[in-house]
């Protein structure tokens, strides 16, 4: 029993809303027809038919019959007949998925051409060469796609013909040549025991099948994987009466954007070719003309085009990308879709459309894709023209990086320790390289595609990468990188642009992001709608300044340990750690006090009027000491010196003593060891010094007449008693520091240990605020040491789709997110007004920000660069959840 | 307005149920009075009064008045009058807390003695020396306790008197001496401007206050801390008419257990002294007689004693510990309480009482304290008499250990790597020693008490320790341990008995636990009532055999990696790890296959009829490789050899290659790194080999006609996809291995990553069973690396009461337990019949077992030694939760 399913829709039967069923192209053609625009007659075979085809590897029952019936209607509308020898109807068979995948699938033109109709077309267009060329292309396509003849067979025939007549390029083929080629193509069919189908209906059937099959071509699959498009969706097929833009000088073909896709400026941005078909634009054999010329050449069609574009923008209320053809003075619209645009243009268009009252502010905000802002906010390559280009590869991970070449992971680790900025250059990368990758600024590989290990890891790490630069040769053993013109070795400087895929010699210039008025406008709107606050993670007053300029409403995380690492400070910190008594330790802490105090003063000044969340010392103490391996090597070297004179002997003694401390502090799993509040609890004098510095700074800045709100944050709390005891001690220190003065402050805690989420109700008894430290929380919830896992298995897990996303980039909703949900719920059960934020690196990721809104956080804190992204996402989150009827 | 609170209860007003208010002693005296036994008249001042006293540092209003009124009643009952110069009533003022704290608090005898009454007592007892001695003791006690005179003042007076008359001991004091001493004591009072209170009422008041105060004496507090008794409870005070066991040969005093407290045998176990007071028994100046003598000496009292004991056992239905005094032929009961007993006696008594139909099986089970079974189940010291005792110290952590002396933590780490069994000997330990402690069998310290660092850590680690052996001298610098008779150095063997606090020279003999019929009986009963299954963690067939003998119903965890570590295997394992291709890896895995297969065959045979849960490879691969530091040192040494001949050169090359692999596999946090199913996923051939070995073994053992149930357990699953993929692969391997044969098996997973608990519903889709790996789950939930934390801060956290219990010993209910609860709930939501167990080390801990019952686990798995404890706890859990009305 055949199901009675409708697989075929005439354009007049569809509309834009049916995009899932008809694909983008089909829905657009239908919509234009509904709007009264001239569209060639045609029909759409649904994505449903495609999905069924993929399942059973055959057309669904009835589909072909419906198509043939629809074709009859097209014949009657066009006044031409499919296969007719005097006035033949030709059709194009075009793919069109619900989500645009430009250039990824097949389109077959001129279906209906055969030995007879080719003559008619030749006459109709007055262009025999065009007719013959179209015909031989159709033959080649059918031979390879449907009959499985090797592509090379046809290519060989073509090139031997060109050789025979000493032709340089395809353009040089004359009608005679083409006739000879068609004949030798026929021979190829015969050789394989096949025949080119002269029956136009058979051709149509084959063409439809070819489009269905192209859905699962390697490049289409790869594109979908990169862009996160489901393989299940399928493509629709549009069968459209061919319109000939090459029927004389009153015919033409062209493409247009309704506004400038680079700048967003409101002016028609279009190109066309007179007496040409679409292919001519693509092949680049002729230079397209500016659209202004059209007004003079075919004024009626131009007027229609301007009118149609007006209708379309009014209707779609967005910038559009259209294709059109003019046949003997009459304009036909072949495609309409929302136009792709640069990030800068997206901002301008959204702002302009609001000004033009076409859309409202909320719609404008929802039109800006957060991930595109990166290219505006991060430093860009500034080309001066004098750059020496070394090679081109795939633009695998955006951004620019400059560094000296290094050829192995282990060497990268060594050099990075010396503070070198590195570009890791490898034939290709494997899991073994990841440690080196994490130490480098960017990567360049000779082999591999957009889903290669290097590409995946680079995107995961957020570092620029150029991969698959096949023209270079990398010999890691000898340490030589050969390009077409240069030979480079370790230590030579190169620059890579992961956005364009270009590799440059030496150091190129970068330019800072330019301020954009349109962005400011959008962000101002965002501030009206968002509920989430946006703060910045900043470790220096300079970063805090940038954050404030970018719109941050406070500091969500200032890591005080970074202040321990200055050259003037590290010797004092080491002496502090080597101290054996509290008194000795206090002596060195007293030396650090004025330094930390000065830092905090600057912070408070920069962030005047906003909260500054300062996290007390967190990392294990051994991070401030030298590395064990190099110490052992140094000791070994000294021991083997023949004469151990006084100075050296003392040095040896000192190193040995240091080694003992390093070994004592050594931990099997420092992430889970003696750090955070555990140090703060057992060496109370450290936190006391820090809090004394904070409150002294606060006192000073307040006396300058500035408003400020210090938030003191205790790291790694897992048990309420930890916070309770530390808080009691710190309040004592604060009272001693402030004396009779009162300054508002908060004491709160990181929530970064899974246990803290589970006992959040008890921890909240002592906390003014929570801040989710999702880096550590992810490490512990997943049991992934980030330093180890990213290289050893996370990239492999992503490649093999064991996990969907790197949980260190985007919050893991099911696991880490679930704990956060529990933490928020229990924390607020105890303390309704508990302030809750997030300061993990995921805080700047759009998906994560949506999630934070969903679970009711008060703010997100992200890197200063990403503040605008965070503001945008915060506003989008409000709207998305309003739309979903949630809040 | 004074509250109308009753602070004083006559014995006839109380009963056993009022133990919280009247304390154990008071409630017992009341109960005996209710039972019609002869009890001296008296009354109890409540614990409530004590708590109020502690709060306000003064007696609560009305308490003293109530006591005076009660005293009047005592006078009338006893026929004697407090302070009367001819027939004076004397009272004892005795502490008595709701929980017994033997010897920890003060008891004051003979209150009411003064210059006048002392004469009357002397006459009444015919024992002037006794009267005088009692008097001077009372004076001394009052002087020190109440008036704050230094103890030394009185001691000095006593010793100078003894010196003056050349007396050796207190016993040599005559009446004359005592009179002189009383006079010089009076002088001491005068010197301090004080006076001994001649007023008996004043004495009583002071005595009551002294008892209240003794609740907070240092030793009482320490005792409570060790035994987990709340400081808030307070003690009651019992004021009891003095009964004189020293009024002639028809008077006596004694103590009795109703059954033998060492063996449990049903016979009166008692000692007494004729014409004596309790103190005489304690001081040891006279040797007590066996109770059989009493029948002849004072037959009436003896008959009463036997009768009373019968009444009491019938009433209390337990073995009792009583104190009695006979005054001129009349028996008085002074105390009754449930008697302390050895573990062995506890078993026999419980079993006997059931046989005697005094209690039921459930009550018998609830009478056995699980922690006491350890002493029966673990090897004990078997003294032969020839042992050389080196020293005595505090018995800080039970059990026996034998090893060679080591004096520093770092040296202990080195020697332990060589496989040495060590006893760490330190003046005292600090946090720095903990790594060494974890590498040693037991500890001996010169300094420190029951709550010292060494003691706390030892108990936390479950290792024997003798601390505070003050008679030894430990010089860690020179590495010398001096005892009274011997001088020992590193490498000398000693034995410590942490149960008795004794240190022996050389190696002493240990004996294995003896089987106990009573234990078997109790365990049989337990099996009737418990719901939890009990399995064992066993890594070798030998351990499995022991587990089965002890009653295990299967193996809950067999760690396959232990099978990788044999001397015949480790070189193969290393070659496997150094392999660079899958083929090479497979080659070495093929060599391991028959070895693992043989292990599994043995396992299945031993565990015939029971499930065996086999965990596939879990630890990071670098655990099978040599240590980096020693490799570097070895390479350095080789490099500095003058002549590098062929062999050495090859060796150097090999070592360098090994170092590269070691460095590649090196991880910052191996706990959170490349291990568990992460290895299994990326090197599928490893798990495939293991499962092939398991199922081949199963096939072989099944063909022997034995029943078996292999349960294959995947470690470290955090994402459902991990289990899904591995399971699919393994099922394929299983089918290939079994061929047409079918054998029942299960595939399940450890739940040891916090995320696994949160997504347990999704994981359960692919799991036949869950097993909570609470070691890792605790590490990740708390963020504690056990290897690091135990030494660096957990012991300090316990000392400072930041955490209540070591979460690696007893499950952390609030955090880890909460995750388990979530895991069970979500897992069973997907799969109602999901089998769930626990295989972390906490699985043998009583509190943890109760918790596992509470959250509905199917079984616990513990060490083979602890199986009987687990069975007992499982049964107790059923009853406790039945009692709580839960299930």
Image (cartoon, coloured by chain):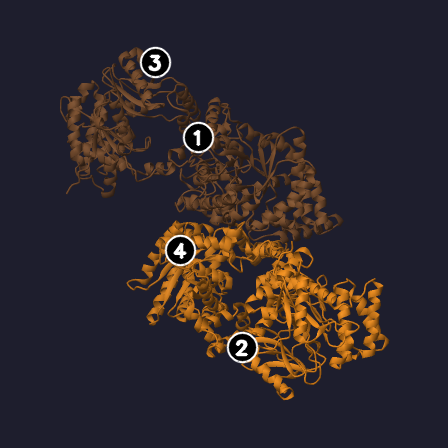
Chain colours: A orange, B brown
- Subunit that carries the residue with mark 4: A
**Callout 3: few (<14), some (14-19), or many (20+) C-alpha neighbours within 10 Å?**
some
**Label annotation for residue A313:** 2
Dot 4 and dot 2 residues touching (CB under 8 Å): no
**Callout 2: few (<14), some (14-19), or many (20+) C-alpha neighbours within 10 Å?**
some
**Label annotation for residue A685:** 4
Is residue B709 shown left or right of residue A742? right
Q: Position of residue A337 (x, y in %)?
A: 58, 72
Is residue B353 shown left or right of residue B717? left
Element on which disc 4 rests: helix
Q: Which residue is mark 3?
A: B292
Element on which disc 1 rests: helix
Work out which residue is located at the far left of the displayed protein and give it.
B85
- Subunit that carries the residue with mark 1: B
Q: Is residue B516 visible?
A: yes
Q: Which residue is mark 1?
A: B372
Dot 3 and dot 2 residues touching (CB under 8 Å): no
Dot 2 and dot 1 residues touching (CB under 8 Å): no
Name the image quarter holding the C terminus of chain A. bottom left
User: Is A534 in front, or is A101?
Assistant: A101
Dot 4 and dot 3 residues touching (CB under 8 Å): no
Could you tell me how far apart the alpha carbons at marks 3 and 1 are, in whole angstroms?
Answer: 31 Å
Could you tell me how far apart the alpha carbons at marks 4 and 3 are, in whole angstroms?
Answer: 67 Å
Check if mark 4 and mark 2 are on a common chain: yes
Q: Which one is in front in this view, the residue at disc 3 or the one at disc 1?
A: 1
Q: Is residue B675 visible?
A: no
Dot 1 and dot 4 residues touching (CB under 8 Å): no
- Subunit that carries the residue with mark 3: B
Q: Position of residue A50 (x, y in %)?
A: 65, 61
**Callout 1: few (<14), some (14-19), or many (20+) C-alpha neighbours within 10 Å?**
some
């Amino acid at each position: 029993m055949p199901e009675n399913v409708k697989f075929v829709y005439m354009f007049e039967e569809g509309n834009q809303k049916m995009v899932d069923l008809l694909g983008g192209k089909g829905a657009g053609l239908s919509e234009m027809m509904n709007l009264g625009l001239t569209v060639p007659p045609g029909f759409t075979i649904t994505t449903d038919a495609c999905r069924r085809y993929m399942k059973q590897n055959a057309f669904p029952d009835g589909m072909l019959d419906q198509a043939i019936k629809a074709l009859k209607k097209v014949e009657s509308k066009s006044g031409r007949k499919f296969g007719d020898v005097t006035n033949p109807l030709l059709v194009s068979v075009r793919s069109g998925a619900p989500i645009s995948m430009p250039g990824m699938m097949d389109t077959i033109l001129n279906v209906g051409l055969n030995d007879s109709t080719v003559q008619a077309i030749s006459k109709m267009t007055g262009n025999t060469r065009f007719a013959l060329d179209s015909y031989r292309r159709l033959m080649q396509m059918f031979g390879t796609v449907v009959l499985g003849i090797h592509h090379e067979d046809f290519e060989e025939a073509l090139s031997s013909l060109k050789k025979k007549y000493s032709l340089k390029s395809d353009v040089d083929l004359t009608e005679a040549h083409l006739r000879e080629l068609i004949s030798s193509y026929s021979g190829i069919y015969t050789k394989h025991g096949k025949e080119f189908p002269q029956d136009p209906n058979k051709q149509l059937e084959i063409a439809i099948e070819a489009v269905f099959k192209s859905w699962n071509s390697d490049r289409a699959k790869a594109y979908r994987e990169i862009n996160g498009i489901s393989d299940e969706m399928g493509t629709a097929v549009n069968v459209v009466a061919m319109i000939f833009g090459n029927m004389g000088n009153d015919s033409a073909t062209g493409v247009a954007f309704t506004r400038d896709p680079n700048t967003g400026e409101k002016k028609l941005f279009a190109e066309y070719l007179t007496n040409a078909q679409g292919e001519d634009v693509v092949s680049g054999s002729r230079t397209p003309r500016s659209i202004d010329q059209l007004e003079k050449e075919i004024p009626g069609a131009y007027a229609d085009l301007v009118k149609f574009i007006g209708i379309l923008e009014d209707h779609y209320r967005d910038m559009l990308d259209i294709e059109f053809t003019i046949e003997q003075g009459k304009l036909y619209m072949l495609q309409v879709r929302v136009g792709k645009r640069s990030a800068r243009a997206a901002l301008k268009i959204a702002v302009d459309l609001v000004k033009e009252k076409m859309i409202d502010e909320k719609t404008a905000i929802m039109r800006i894709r957060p991930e595109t802002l990166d290219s505006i906010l991060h430093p860009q390559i500034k080309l001066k023209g004098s750059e020496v280009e070394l090679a081109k590869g795939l633009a695998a991970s955006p951004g620019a990086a400059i560094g000296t070449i290094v050829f192995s992971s282990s060497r990268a680790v060594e050099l990075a320790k010396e503070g070198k900025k590195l570009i890791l250059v490898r034939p290709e990368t494997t899991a073994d390289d990841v440690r080196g990758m994490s130490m480098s600024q960017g990567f360049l590989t000779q082999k591999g595609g957009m889903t290669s290990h290097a590409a995946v890891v680079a995107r995961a790490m957020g570092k620029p990468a150029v991969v698959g630069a096949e023209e270079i040769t990398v010999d890691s053993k000898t340490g030589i990188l050969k390009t077409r013109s240069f030979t480079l070795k370790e230590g030579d400087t190169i620059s890579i642009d992961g956005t364009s895929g270009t590799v440059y010699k030496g150091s190129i210039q970068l330019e800072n992001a330019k301020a954009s008025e349109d962005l400011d406008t959008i962000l101002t709107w965002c501030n009206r709608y968002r509920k989430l606050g946006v703060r910045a993670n900043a470790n220096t007053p300079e970063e805090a300044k940038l954050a404030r300029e970018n719109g941050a409403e406070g500091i969500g995380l200032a890591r005080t340990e970074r202040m321990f690492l200055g050259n003037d400070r590290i010797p004092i910190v080491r002496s502090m750690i080597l101290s054996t008594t509290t008194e000795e330790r206090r002596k060195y802490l007293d030396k650090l006090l004025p330094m930390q105090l000065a830092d905090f003063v600057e912070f408070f000044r920069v962030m005047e009027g906003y909260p500054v969340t300062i996290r007390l010392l967190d990392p294990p103490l051994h991070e401030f000491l030298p590395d064990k391996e190099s110490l052992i090597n140094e000791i070994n070297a000294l021991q083997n010196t023949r004469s151990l004179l006084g100075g050296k002997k003392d040095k040896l003694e000192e190193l040995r003593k240091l080694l003992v401390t390093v070994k004592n502090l050594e931990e099997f799993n420092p992430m889970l060891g003696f750090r955070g509040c555990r140090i703060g609890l057992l060496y109370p004098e450290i936190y006391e010094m820090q809090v004394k510095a904070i409150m002294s700074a606060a006192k000073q800045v307040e006396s300058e007449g500035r408003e400020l709100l210090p938030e003191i944050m205790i790291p790694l709390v897992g048990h309420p008693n930890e916070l309770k005891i530390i808080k009691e001690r710190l309040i004592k220190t604060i009272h001693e520091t402030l004396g009779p003065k009162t300054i508002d402050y908060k004491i709160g805690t990181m929530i970064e240990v899974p246990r803290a989420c589970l006992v959040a109700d008890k921890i909240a008894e002592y906390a003014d605020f929570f801040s989710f430290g999702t880096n550590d929380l992810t490490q512990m919830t997943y049991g992934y040491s980030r330093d180890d896992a990213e290289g050893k298995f996370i990239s492999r897990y992503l490649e093999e789709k064991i996990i969907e996303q790197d949980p260190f980039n985007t919050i893991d909703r099911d696991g880490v997110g679930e704990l956060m949900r529990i933490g928020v719920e229990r924390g607020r059960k105890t303390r309704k007004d508990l302030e809750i934020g997030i300061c993990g690196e995921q805080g700047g990721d759009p998906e994560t920000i949506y999630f934070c809104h969903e679970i009711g956080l008060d703010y997100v804190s992200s890197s200063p660069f990403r503040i605008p992204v965070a503001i945008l996402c915060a506003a989008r989150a409000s709207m998305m959840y309003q739309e979903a009827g949630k809040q």
